[in-house]
Image (spheres, rainbow, N blue to C red):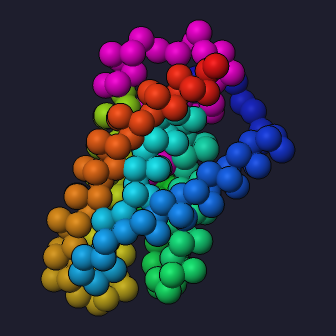
Amino acid sequence: MSERRRLTLQDIVAIGALSSMCAIATAIKIPLGVGAMVHLGTAFLFTVAIVFGGVYAGLSAAIGSAFFDLLMGFSPYTPWSFVIKGGAGLIAGVIAHGLWPQNNPAAAPVPAWARFRAILGCIVAAAWTLAGYILAWWQVTGSLTVAFANIPASLLTSTVGLIVAVILAPKLKKALQR
């Protein structure tokens, strides 16, 4: 595990920018059912997790997703999204990359192993998200039937997010290392 460190001003600014981009990516959506949607917010979350790690992905996903819910009229889901998406970003980022962005590109893992870790991190985070939102949908709508009806949309969103992130993240990493 890497050494303990605190958030710097640069970290806070980067997380703020990533949070706003997460909210925008989540706004690119197709609604499916009560509270469920297929959107690019998950693709953004997974990409940030693979490229920057758990702290950036967790905080930007928590803040960006909660902000989206507040702005777009999904306020009953705001605390749920903060915890669920924040946890998903942290989980995916820690498994795929570690806690913090690496300053030394030479310390990056072997590409095949990195790809495996990225996919594994996104799958575990998708499972966390699905479980969390089943509970959220049930509590907000009062119907377990509605919650279960939204499972396909959650799985589709996570699948699209995984595909986009696995394609986009290596290209973004390469561009950032230059």
**Picture quadrant of residue 141:** bottom left
Side (left or right) of 82 relative to 123 = right
Q: Residue at x 17, y 65 (%)?
A: 152
Q: Is residue 22 above or below residue 134?
A: above
Residue 167 pos. (x, y %): 35, 34
Q: Residue at x 46, y 83 (%)?
A: 74
Look at the magenta stretch and give its main secondary structure.
helix
Q: Is residue 10 above or below residue 139?
A: above
Q: Residue at x 71, y 46 (%)?
A: 14
Q: Is residue 115 above or below residue 43?
A: above
Q: Residue furthest right?
A: 9
Name the residue nearer the viewer: 81 or 20: 20
Asked whether residue 135 is in view, the answer is no
**Picture quadrant of residue 29:** bottom left
How many circles with numbers are drawn on the protein?
0
Side (left or right) of 123 relative to 71 = left
Q: Residue at x 48, y 60 (%)?
A: 25
Q: Residue furthest bottom?
A: 142
Q: Which residues are magenta?
A: 88-116
The quadrant of the picture occupied by the C terminus is top right
Asked whether residue 65 is in view, the answer is yes
Residue 36 pos. (x, y %): 30, 74
The quadrant of the picture occupied by the N terminus is top right
Q: Check residue 115 for magenta coloring.
A: yes
Q: Check residue 37 for magenta coloring.
A: no
Residue 89 pos. (x, y %): 48, 48
